[in-house]
Image (spheres, helix red, strand yellow):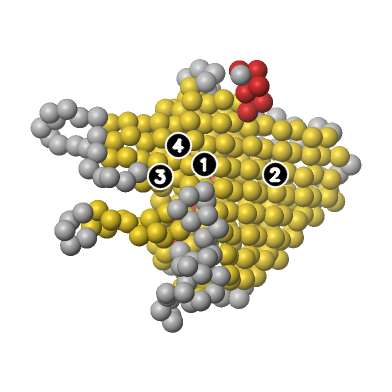
Amino acid sequence: MFLKNFFVFILVLFFSLKSSSQGIIVDTSKVIGWQNSGKTTFLINQTAFSNWTSGGENSIAATLSVDYNLNYYKNGWSWDTKMIGSFGVNKNSDSKFFKKIDDRVEINSVMGKKFIDKFSFSSFFNFKTQFAKGFKYSNNDQGDEVRTERTRVFSPAYIQLGVGIYWKQSNSLWVNFAPVTGRLILASKKFTNDLENDEEYFGIPRGQNSRFELGASISAFYKFELIENVMLEQRVNLYSDYLNKADNIDVDYTLSAFMKINDYLSTTLIIQCLYDDNAIKKIQLREVFGLAFVIDILEIPNII
């Protein structure tokens, strides 16, 4: 019941923010030919203490992100691709390790052929993995911090292919529903060979390097100006596996807020909620807040 309520909450949040927005969506989706856009963001936050009697830890964190969009439209055919790469680390004064705070590679591509206004028959492709190794941290018998490798590039990796219906108002607002979606989960046998017989690694059983699922997928994107100089961006991806626990829905929701200071600086808030019981039977939550240096990708040649 709790997970169903969480799923409903995410949908209500997505559409309530849509209805409450004050910004006007400029429809650029019917521009003939190719369009591209994107930004590079370097986000940093830092904490320092000196003789601070209340206690505290010195820390610094930094994240570099690239977000690139490629859109095409002609004769009722559309092809929209979004590519995201992000990597961030944190270092605390009491730890000898740099620890990841963000690490993802994602490609989402939707192709559609319009059959009525704003609606298209669609096919989509989605790919997700990470750049670097991920670790689980603990203390040994001597009290020293140690780490054990838990993930790496392509372990896991997710590939989805599906067909369905694509509703698109603009490049800033769309929803894709794919009732027939195949999902392949990949991983190195390094992480599955030593599992117990009843254990799984992101849903992959002992000694295997892949898992196939057949289900339904919903993905949606909405970007708008909430008030002057404050942009909100929402992304949600939902997946249900017909072959195993169809009522157990995987959720990936990200809310990003960008509060513009000038052409290159903004205050950025990112909140991400995940639920995937193949990874962990709990809701995962990530929040990042800091000062960001933002460059439009198309302006980089002029800056250099």
**Residue 63, labelled with which disc?**
4
Instruction: Give the number of the disc on residue 149.
Output: none
In the picture of the structure, the residue carrying the numbered disc 3 is 101
| Pointer 4 or 1: first along the chain | 4
Q: Quadrant of the C terminus?
A: top right
Disc 3 or 2, which lies upstream in sequence?
2
Q: In which quarter of the image is residue 173?
A: top right
Amino acid type at image mark 1? Ser
Q: Could you say whether the residue bearing mark 1 is in a helix, strand or loop?
A: strand
Disc 4 and disc 1: Cα gap in Å? Answer: 7 Å
Q: Are marks 3 and 4 in contact (CB under 8 Å)?
A: yes
* Side of 46 where 4 appears, left or right: right
Q: What's the CA distance linking mark 3 and mark 4?
A: 8 Å
Marks 3/1 in contact by CB < 8 Å: the verdict is no
Judging by the rendered image, the residue that carries numbered circle 2 is 81
Residue bearing the label numbered 1: 86
Q: Are the two marked residues, 4 and 1, in contact with CB atoms closer than 8 angstroms?
A: yes
The disc labelled 3 sits on which kind of residue? Ile
Mark closer to the chain start, 4 or 2: 4
Say which quadrant the N terminus sits in.
Answer: bottom left
> Residue 302 falls in which quadrant of the image?
top right
Q: Name the residue type under label 4.
A: Thr
Q: Position of residue 214 (x, y in %)?
A: 65, 70
